[in-house]
Image (spheres, helix red, strand yellow):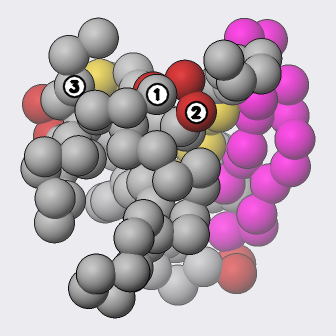
Amino acid sequence: MGGPIYEFQFFVYQDAKNGNWWLEIGANYTILGFWPQRIFQGLYDSGSYVACGGEAFRPANTGRPHMGTGYFPKTEAREYNAYCQDMLVVDKQHKIVYADDYTEEFTSDMTHYAASQEG
């Protein structure tokens, strides 16, 4: 059922010394790129919001949405779906903290889509 499952680690943070935003990937934190501080107005000295997820729309009575595989992650083949988990954030003191206590979930369909899924 399905193909291989890939799991990636991403780390985005603002450098405390120069204010640039960095993207690192993998367990060894390989630098993939950065965004200079000067290109951001709202993120000049910090960020206050982290988001991940997706959005799909379907008109009423037209079947499953066309985004992704069409399988519902909560009730059907979870191995076909993308997900975010174990989110960490870097606070204003440049300390890494778990985001669990600060997360907010939104879905218009709790029957099929929910972050708090039974594994």
Q: Are marks 2 and 1 in contact (CB under 8 Å)?
A: yes
The residue singled out by tag 1 in the image is: 77
Residue at image point 18% right, 29% down: 116
Q: Main secondary structure of the magenta part?
A: strand
Mark 2 residue type: Tyr
- Nearest to the observer: residue 45 or residue 62: 62
Q: Are marks 3 and 2 in contact (CB under 8 Å)?
A: no
Count the labels in the image. 3
Q: Quadrant of residue 49?
A: bottom left
- Nearest to the observer: residue 75 or residue 106: 75
The residue singled out by tag 2 in the image is: 80
- Nearest to the observer: residue 76 or residue 5: 76
Between the C-alphas of marks 1 and 3, the distance is 13 Å
Q: Can you give x and y, in whole percent of width and height, for residue 76 in the image? A: 37, 32
Residue 117 circle label: 3
Q: Quadrant of residue 94?
A: top left
